[in-house]
Image: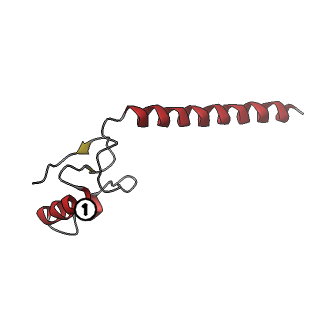
Amino acid sequence: MTGSGSDSISLFLVIVLLMLMVLLMVVTRRRDPLRDIPGPKPYPVIGNVFEMVQIEAVDLFLKWCKEYGKILKYQVFLLGEWHIPVGG
């Protein structure tokens, strides 16, 4: 019978943790000033590195400028830093 009480506490803690994670994601997304800048969607963990090693950087940026516009964003690994090249 004592296991039932600890199971409900564990379930409660998991639910609270999930709610906090969702809240953090919502608040972070709302404050991100770069979210409106278009760009290729980064892969988990590696960001846009996979695309960058396939072709020359200049050709890739020209391709991205045609696809996303003169100002775009991309991410190299998921370190929280976005790179914003400006094409002409």
Residue drawn 86% across and 31% down?
2
How packed is label 1: few (under 14 Cα within 10 Å), some, or many (20 or more)?
A: few
**Percent coordinates x, y for residue 19 in the rendering:** 60, 34
Q: Nearer the viewer, residue 15 or 60?
A: 60
Indicate the amino acid at tag 1.
Answer: Glu
Position of 29 relative to 48 (above/below):
above
Q: Secondary structure at mark 1?
A: helix
**Percent coordinates x, y for residue 65 in the rendering:** 19, 58
Q: Could you tell me which quadrant the N terminus lies in?
A: top right
**Percent coordinates x, y for residue 75 in the rendering:** 28, 50
Q: Is 27 left, or right, of 81 in this rendering?
A: right
Q: Could you tell me which quadrant the C terminus lies in?
A: bottom left
Residue drawn 29% across and 63% down?
50
Position of 75 relative to 50 (above/below):
above
Give the image quarter of residue 16.
Answer: top right
Residue drawn 27% across and 58% down?
49
Residue drawn 13% across and 53% down?
87
**Percent coordinates x, y for residue 42 in the rendering:** 35, 54
Q: Is 57 left, or right, of 38 in this rendering?
A: left
Q: Nearer the viewer, residue 37 or 13?
A: 37
Position of 17 relative to 87 (above/below):
above
Q: Nearer the viewer, residue 7 or 51?
A: 51
**Disc count in the image?**
1
Write down the residue under mark 1. 67
Q: Is 55 left, or right, of 4 in this rendering?
A: left
